[in-house]
Amino acid sequence: MSFVTKVASLASYDKGTIELNDDLKHYAFSNIFEVASKAKPFERVMVASNLEYCAEAVRAEGTSDWYTAPHDEFAIVMDGEIEFTFFQLTDTEQPKHKQGAAKLGGQPQGKRMGRVIARRGHEVLLPKGSAYQFKAAKPSVAIIQTSAGPESVERWSEICVLN
Amino acid sequence: MNAAIENVKVIASAPDPVLGYRKFQFGSFSFTRDMYFVHVTWPKGTHTVEVDRFLRAMVRDIGWGFFYGWIFFDDVFGTQNHYGTVDIFAGTYSKGHRDTGVDFLETFNTDDVRVAFETISKNWINEGYDPLRAPMETGSPLGPKTKDASGPLIRGFEPARRMMGLPGDVAPRSDASGHPINRAFADLTFDKPTIEAEPGFEGQIHAFNLYDHIARADVTWNPSFTSITRACICCVTSEEHMLPVIHGNDRNEWFIQLTDEIHWNIQDKNTGNPRGRIVMKSGDVCAMPADIRHQGFSPKRSMLMVLENGTPGLEEKYAKGELEPFPITASRW
């Protein structure tokens, strides 16, 4: 017997179902590819939120601004190919916000640390102390493990199944 | 939370002269197995569980460190983690048992429960049966005692400290570690990310193939910590057949279905009354609130990512009602 693994993509996803005798808002059921299909490039739309922590769905398309966070973040590429470029933060670029990703507000001034080119299933460290940028030649999708920050977008009523 | 009984040791009987298994006494509970079933006895009653189900639940309970909240082996018997002490209960969350007054709960130090469960499992697991594997990938637990299993009783639990694969951290599974790609993911191709670190930044720029790591799991329903953001833990697991426990949450957790699909039964945590079901497909995201029990069924081996909040003391805030038992509060809608 040969198996067929179903891995959804931006071009092909099939959302599941939620049938509960409960308030569906308590479950915040959504689909990353559906969220990404309706998002602007590099919007960081929260799809999971656990007190200060969250996961953000990102549609990568073109070249992003530069981001930084006062803690490690992690990106998992769910579809396509994304290039991540990293620069070391200078003393003056250190983040002043408490958590989550914020835009650097310009080009990074520190040393170039390197880059990662990641495809479906790859998990990438977005290290504390760095500025990072996404690039994608074609629409791609990533999910970011992080904390809620200045760039996090909440639109639960739009993305979740409510009936 | 009750005070734990101090320093309780599990007491083993001589092997049964016919079947060869030992009987165990731990606190007020006794545990006996025969060819097909495990019988748990406490001062007010006895409960019988099919042996495969019992052993699959018990080794995961040990390996998970009793996990977050409640682990129901079935609707009657299980454990609750108080992070230092563990309750073993029978009927406490079953209306019928409570109504008839046969429910029972005893609190022990965590290490004592771990030692007791390991001792029982080691005696009751025979060579050729591996309760951490999917049912189609292992032998049967039924029948009399043959020979103790020689492999590790629990495995696959070493958590990454920052991110899997970083220098000095836990390594992802590989052929070299003895973990081939599982048959159910043989149709996928797995490549490596391109990593180009500038001189002096080697080891600081990092990526790995998460799906490859999951596809090589030789265990099911057994989370592997891969990355940690402060107290936010990313756990990934390979799921096939059924979650052999019913997990009762003491905090909110989030599921992200990476491949294939899992069907979840949702129940009220305290009563066990059904609330409904959720079918999660690839790309779906769903919260598991702090006031439910859930059990998953994966028709084909699938990949699941779970985001946990490991902040110490969180369980008490939910228990006291200081935090609402669902993650997205009303003002955020």
Image (cartoon, helix red, strand yellow):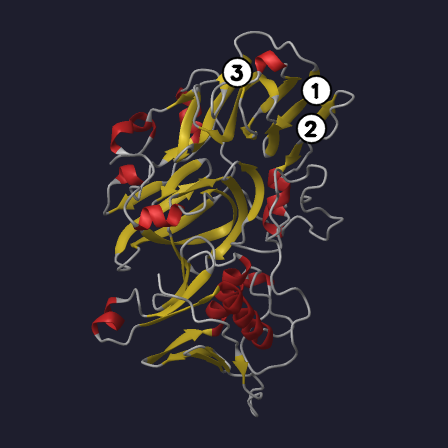
A22 left or right of B47? Answer: left
Q: Would you call the spot at circle 1 few (<14 residues within 10 Å), some (14-19), or many (20 or more)? A: many
Closer to the eye: label 2 or 1? 2
Name the residue nearer the viewer: B143 or B132.
B132
Q: Would you call the spot at circle 3 few (<14 residues within 10 Å), some (14-19), or many (20 or more)? A: many
- Asked which secondary structure carries label 3, the reply is strand
B199 left or right of B234? Answer: right
**Image coordinates for residue B191, horizontal then vertical, percent:** 68, 34
Residue furthest to the left: B99
Q: Tag 3 or tag 1, which sits nearer the N-term? A: 3
Closer to the eye: label 3 or 2? 2
**Image coordinates for residue A55, horizontal then vertical, percent:** 46, 31
Label 3: which residue? A61
At a point 72% along the width and 30% down the height, the residue shown is B203
Q: Would you call the spot at circle 2 few (<14 residues within 10 Å), some (14-19), or many (20 or more)? A: some
At a point 52% along the width and 27% down the height, the residue shown is A142
Residue furthest to the top: A106
Badge count? 3
Q: Amino acid at mark 2?
A: Gln
Do tag 1 and tag 3 residues touch (Cβ < 8 Å)?
no
Q: Give a yes or no on whether discs 1 and 3 share a subunit.
A: yes
Query: Quadrant where the C terminus of chain A lies?
Result: top left
Label 1: which residue? A114
Q: Amino acid at mark 1?
A: Gly
Q: Amino acid at mark 3?
A: Glu
Label 2: which residue? B204
**Image coordinates for residue A158, horizontal then vertical, percent:** 31, 25
Q: Give a yes or no on whether discs 2 and 1 share a subunit.
A: no
